[in-house]
Image (cartoon, rainbow, N blue to C red):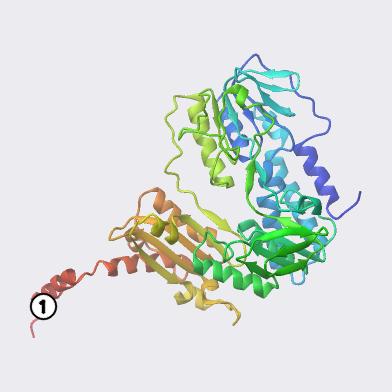
Amino acid sequence: MSYPGVEFDAEAWQLLSPADYVNPEPQNAYHLVVVGAGPAGLISAIGAAGLGASVALIERHRMGGDCLNVGCMPSKSLLAYTETHKDPDFSQAFRWLRQVRADIAPHDSVQRYTDAGVDVFLGDAVLNANGTVCVGDIVLKGRRVALCTGARAAVPPIPGLLASDPLTNESVFDLREKPESLAILGAGAIGCELAQVFARLGVRVELFELATRVLPNESELASATVAQALTQAGVRIHTGHAVREIKDGGQVVTDQGNIECERVLVALGRQPNTDGMKLADAKVEVDQRGFIVTDNKLRTTNKKIFAAGDCAAALQFTHHADAQARVLVQNALFPATAKVDGLVVPHCTYTQPEVASVGASAEQLRASGTDYDEYEYYFDELDRTKAMPFADTVPRAAKGHVAVLTAKGKDTILGATVIGDDAGEMLAPLCLMMTQKLGLSAAQSTIFSYPTRSEYLKRLGDAYNRSRMTPSVAKLFSRWLKFTQPKD
């Protein structure tokens, strides 16, 4: 079947899951057998092979996992295309995402990993009682096993939802025709990003969220700023009421009334890909939701078997899977000394404006009874931002805003949120500072280029320094300056 970008899909699928691929003859035993070729599995496999270990990598669908195929890169491609094109065309936007995916595919391809010395096996993996991994009739023995099977979209038991043939992140990027209208269930990062994309493409978008605001895990200012941007894009937001039923294939039933839509998109969380692997036979414990239970060294209840990435992590981000994979490789091949607790893990919602956060939020700190100080800064006070031609309708926070939370009376950063263009990039220095245990005083003593938006860090450092000017300190300064007053 022909559709815009079909040639790019053909190119990508041949690289990521070649139709003519023949599984290799397995070695007698491997240092590491990796199940799942998403970010955690890919990094674990190539990292271990790069250290000289013998590695087997198993993938049942396509190399690259959700991030490349149905997650990060397709969504960001559509966001970028629809932001930079006036009146973007649906077919051309989806052709662009397929081209981007094909351009990245060689990096995650079967060929790249076999060239790196990894034995790649395509098929379903099952564990047996002694922890050995089987792919069909092929038995793969490993000194250690890494489960990196990822997660998939969770579809809640809302009456009529399954019958409506709902879209998820696994199917929405395969659309070949523009729907007239789209109901999106869930206003977290995925829901908000795709709401903005489809509204820009001329689709009537109805966004539903049980919480009282979009992005409920972000700050109230961030939530309000994104909500305004979505509304300006044409998205109709419905918050604070549960979706009770989906009738007639697309009619969304809530306490506030019924809204008819052509298609329904579910963006209501994730569930792990752990079913069908016979984990119980290998004495690998899972929690009530099916996520693999690990300790802080990523060991499962079977100490021969490790797990990393979305199948085992509460924080389901590609960069978190990357960090976990590096810990897994060290602990699986060498004495287990690396730990994952204490990792500083940021996250970003790539709407326009972006919202990027790291560490604890104000709500989390208040709920835990933790006292904190807050330092905030609006980027429109920076000369660089004043030179930017923002439209009059852009709210102040959308031009750039940062809020940093520190331990009460201390220079210890507990969390931060940045709103605005490139918020994910602007947050990066704060992530580094938190990882290296640096406070805002470090920013105050650092020189930044002028005029740049990175100067916001200097302004935060100045604000922290001013907070140290207690009445006692001010009194001492006054006495000293009076003592050193020049004589006539």
Q: Position of residue 182 (x, y in %)?
A: 76, 63
Is 36 rendered above or below residue 96? above
Q: How many labels does the image show?
A: 1
- The local secondary structure at tag 1 comes to helix
Residue at 62%, 22% in the rendered image: 281
Q: Where is residue 36 in the image (x, y as percent from the top left)?
A: 66, 34
Amino acid on which disc 1 is placed: Lys
Q: Position of residue 205 (x, y in %)?
A: 73, 67
Furthest residue in direction right, as rendered: 1
Tell which of 442 and 60 is nearer to you.
Answer: 60
Residue 204: tell me if it is visible: no
Is 99 rendered above or below residue 373? above
Tell which of 271 and 231 is nearer to you.
Answer: 271
Residue at 62%, 72% in the rendered image: 229
Q: Label 1: which residue?
A: 482
**Label 1: few (<14), some (14–19) or many (≥20) C-alpha neighbours in 10 Å:** few
Is 432 rendered above or below residue 235? above
Residue 470: tell me if it is visible: yes
Quarter of the image with the C terminus in it: bottom left
Q: Quadrant of residue 286?
A: top right
Furthest residue in direction top, as rendered: 28
Q: Quadrant of residue 456?
A: bottom left
Residue at 56%, 57% in the rendered image: 348
Furthest residue in direction bottom, as rendered: 488
Q: Position of residue 95 (x, y in %)?
A: 80, 56
Q: In which quarter of the image is residue 151?
A: top right
Is residue 423 left or right of 25 when viewed as pictured?
A: left
